Amino acid sequence: DSGLNLYSDIYQRPIANSKPANYIHGALTQHTIDALNTYACLEFELSKTASIQASLDSSFKFYHSLSISEQKAVVSFLNTILYDYERLSEEKLSRLFLNLSLKIKSKMSWISTFQVNEITSIYTKHFPKLFHEAMFVGNGTNPYILEGSTFSFMGIDKKNKCIFSPLTGNCSTQDNANTGTILNSTTISLLKRVARKYNIEYSERPFKLNEVLSFKAFYCVSTTRIKIQDKMYHLQPCKSINTALLNYSQTDTYVKLMKAMYEYSMEYSYDFKHTEKDLAYTISSH
């Protein structure tokens, strides 16, 4: 209800217009997210920084200042703390810490005062303000937004219009048939169908990260991220991307679309009549 904090990762699905059976990159990015969150929690608790948001921002900037090998090492170290704490003695933690680079050890000197069995309660306490999900983007300092690891996006721009990404063309230059191509979302398709039926104006065009920061609202869209309340649907808002806060206001266009989708779903029925079809089985009268 309060919104998701997203972490962006450069990634193009290898077969972009097909539903993947392999979510390995989403899982790998989640490992990075878990490590950044763990760092933020520990820095905040042990160094007494101004806020958990400040520590998350510090975590993000520190991670991206590291070399690729250092990034892998710090992700492995912090995920070991988060997931193997029950088997992690203080002696073993010290040995693992000594294997990290001088740059990492200097930045994380506060780890020496950490009690490993506290990590679960610390992480849970701060989770609402940590990173939650991965979003995939193109290359560059102001990349094109592609899709979430398990969801798509809808924006409300400054002109109060619904904005959807096209299935192709979300890139500056196309390297191959997949570049700038995203998975077709059944929920997005439904939203567009409802918008057309109820004459709600929308646009289908690529958008970049910096543009989204100026949107009136930005939503993560999938069948598992919708709820019904007060006779209208509600989408899950995005609260931040890479610690940069997004705007959020429930615009008239959004309310109209969500109420229309509720009305559409309540009135919808299949045109299937089993008595008029040739079936491969017999309906028993008993």
Image (cartoon, rainbow, N blue to C red):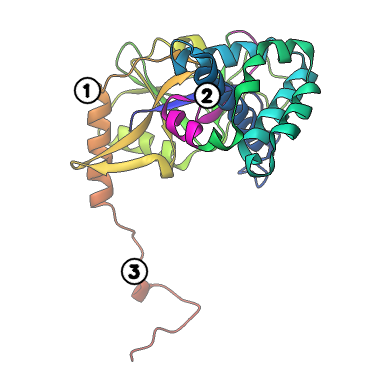
Q: Residues within 10 Å of mark 1 (few under 14, many from 20)?
A: few
Q: CA distance from mark 3 to mark 2?
A: 57 Å
Give the image quarter of residue 168: top right
Q: Nearer the viewer, residue 158 or 82?
A: 82
Q: Is 202 covered by the magenta stretch?
A: no
Query: First in sequence: mark 3 or mark 2?
Result: 2
76 on left or right of 225: right
The image position of residue 194, as x and y in percent, is: 31, 37
Which residue position holds label 2?
41
Total numbered badges shown on the rendered structure = 3
| Residue at the farthest bottom position | 286
Q: Is residue 131 above or below residue 80?
A: above
Give the image quarter of residue 155: top left
Which residue position holds label 3?
273
Give the image quarter of residue 38: top right
Q: CA distance from mark 2 to mark 1?
A: 38 Å
Q: Residues within 10 Å of mark 2 (few under 14, many from 20)?
A: many
Which residue position holds label 1?
252
Does the rendering let one see residue 206? no
186 on left or right of 267: right
* Magenta-tinted stretch: 121-141
